[in-house]
Amino acid sequence: MLAGVASILAITPAAAANQPVASGLLAYMAARADDADGDGAESVRRYAAALADAPGNVDVALRAYREALIVGDDALVDRAAAALAATGVAPADTALVAIAAAARKHDLAAADAAIARLAGDKLAVLGAPLKAWAVQERGGDPFAILAQRPRDSVARRLADENRALIQIARGQYDEGMAGLRALLGNDQASVDLRIAAAQLLIGAGQDVRARELLGGDLTAIVALREQPRGVKPSLAFGAARLFVRLADDLAAGDPGPLSITLTRAALRAEPDNDRARLLLASTLARIDRTDRALAGKGLGRGRRIARGSPCSPGPSAMTRRSASPRRWLSRRTRPMSRWRRWPICCSPPTA
């Protein structure tokens, strides 16, 4: 038996990647080799096999979870997250995926349970706004939750932003617009907040009020002004925007697993969220997964950023024969001396 295990361990990663999946250990080794080679689809298949064979192996489950998030395999994400939860070592960000899945299905009981898992973690800043959106969808009073002023400045800011959006969602347009005026600035978060509020207003037939928020020549603003696309309020809407909000803040630093989880969760809640799609593509490119970044613009489901979307990069950026996809993606995230960075779906300010 020891000789058999030793023979498996002696297989080089390259050789393991070329052999059939014969056991959980071999599948895991082959998946690691595929990871190194950048073959995301194959590594996910092998991680799935390894997880099925050894569901209690924390290392296998964690790597399967992370790779499934990169590739966008929701089924494996859920399986790996469940395996990690069963061993009691599930990362805090698995709650984000659970919230998104529940919000998409309008399963508010499941959403409540997942939101409760954020308590005590750094992601707890999302707790009150998410609870408020869940109560709003349920038909209750979300403002009772947001009335509790948190000590943390980030949590306060998120509460204020979502209070204004929920006021608009409830038809309290004057109060919501007043709240927005007190919050809006010139940063990317303000652009996203303007767009979210305008989409709610358009969805409610308040086009005149929406146009008040859509002044200026930023690409995303102009696109929504010229092709108004409204939305209806829901937990999925609120969760997706919260996740994108935090992912955008994280994008200024080194990309990490949380950035990928946030954008994947946003897309799980709202599959047509182009802002999340481009943030995800940007993050994947920065961790040298450009293959997944380019494929990720469709996210494996035949989805593409619509030509008229506020986040469309324009026809010339990726279709010119001389344009390199890798260079195009790096330009979309290159830091600039005068601005924090080029907003992912907006043109930079003019001089």
Image (tube, rainbow, N blue to C red):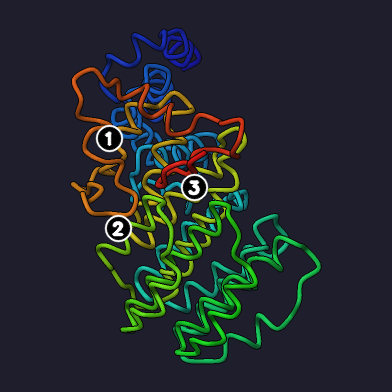
Residue 102, horizontal then vertical, whole percent: 42, 69
Of the two numbered discs 2 and 1 on the same chain, state the one appearing first in sequence: 2
Q: Earlier in the sequence, mark 3 or mark 1?
A: 3
> Which residue appears at 61% of the width and 64% of the height?
126
Residue 326 drawn above or below residue 60: above
Q: Is residue 182 left or right of residue 335?
A: right
Residue 261 numbered mark, or none? 3
The amino acid on which the numbered mark 3 sits, given as a three-letter code, is Thr
The disc placed on residue 272 is 2
User: Identity of the amino acid at label 1?
Assistant: Ala
Q: Please give the residue where the numbered disc 1 appears in the rendered image.
A: 295
Instruction: Identify the residue at image location x=39%, y=30%.
Output: 24
Name the image quarter holding residue 254. Answer: top right
Report helix, strand or loop for mark 3: helix
Q: Residue 167, percent across and down? A: 52, 84
Estimate how packed mark 3 is, as few (under 14), some (14 to 19) or many (20 or more) residues with alpha carbons within 10 Å: many
Looking at the image, which is closer to me, 48 or 142?
Answer: 142
Q: CA distance from mark 2 to mark 3?
A: 17 Å
For residue 122, side relative to residue 58 (left or right): right
**Callout 2, which amino acid?**
Asp
Q: CA distance from mark 2 to mark 1?
A: 15 Å
Q: Residue furthest front?
A: 351
Q: Nearer the viewer, residue 293 or 99?
A: 293
